[in-house]
Image (cartoon, rainbow, N blue to C red):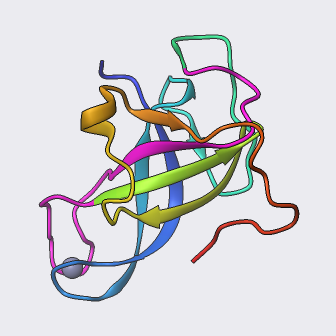
Amino acid sequence: MSAYNIVAGVSVTCPQCQAKVSVGVQFKFGATWQYRYVVGDLLRWGGNDVGTPGRARVVSDGAADSPCPACGYAGDWDFYVFIEHDRIVGVSEADGTYDFVRAGRTHLDLGDGSESSGSPRSR
Ligand SMILES: [Zn+2]
């Protein structure tokens, strides 16, 4: 349960001090072995795999891997990591849209058939 990957250098707004800061976001999808990715990278597979390779669109539960560099905030700081065809396409702050607790796992498959061409989700 301790293995995860990190999306590095995600620009976010601290929920406590509202500073614009850069943090790493932990998530579990693909081969999980503390790989460091950036948005746009292809995921690796082949060790401690979580999920299924090649899915059209997946959202993974994410969490900040360090306190806020500005104020030290270390409370709940959750994110969604969006993955399309094994590529990290974006990270956004969690807003309750997806319920991983209710799903009982750390990622949700958003389906193959509902791709809207040429409109990557980014905020
Ligand atoms: Zn802060």
Query: Where residue 58 sits in the image (x, y, percent)?
Result: 60, 41
Q: Is the residue 18 above or below the residue 29 in the image?
A: below
Task: Decide if residue 67 is on the left or right side of residue 98.
Answer: left
Residue 89 lies within the magenta run = no
Query: Where residue 53 sits in the image (x, y, percent)?
Result: 71, 22
Residue at horizontal 45 percent and vertical 54 percent from the top? 80
Question: Hey, which residue is sitting farthest front in the picture?
Answer: 113
Give residue 96's quadrant in the image: bottom left
Quarter of the image where the N terminus is located: top left
- The boundaries of the magenta stretch are 51-77
Query: Where residue 45 sits in the image (x, y, percent)?
Result: 68, 19
Give residue 106's quadrant in the image: top left
Q: Is the residue 120 above or below the residue 70 in the image?
A: above
Question: Hey, which residue is sitting farthest top in the picture?
Answer: 47
Taking depth in this image into account, of 105 and 10 the one nearest to the observer is 105
Q: Which secondary structure class fits the magenta region best?
A: loop
Give residue 52's quadrant in the image: top right
Quarter of the image where the C terminus is located: bottom right
Query: Where residue 28 sits in the image (x, y, percent)?
Result: 45, 32
Task: Decide if residue 56 is on the left or right side of residue 27.
Answer: right
Taking depth in this image into account, of 113 and 72 the one nearest to the observer is 113
Q: Is the residue 39 above or below the residue 20 in the image?
A: above
Quarter of the render that holds ligand 1: bottom left
Q: Is the residue 33 above or below the residue 62 in the image?
A: above
Residue 56 lies within the magenta run = yes
Residue at horizontal 49 percent and vertical 36 percent from the top? 108
Q: How many marks?
A: 0
Residue at horizontal 48 percent and vertical 42 percent from the top? 60
Taking depth in this image into account, of 56 and 2 the one nearest to the observer is 56
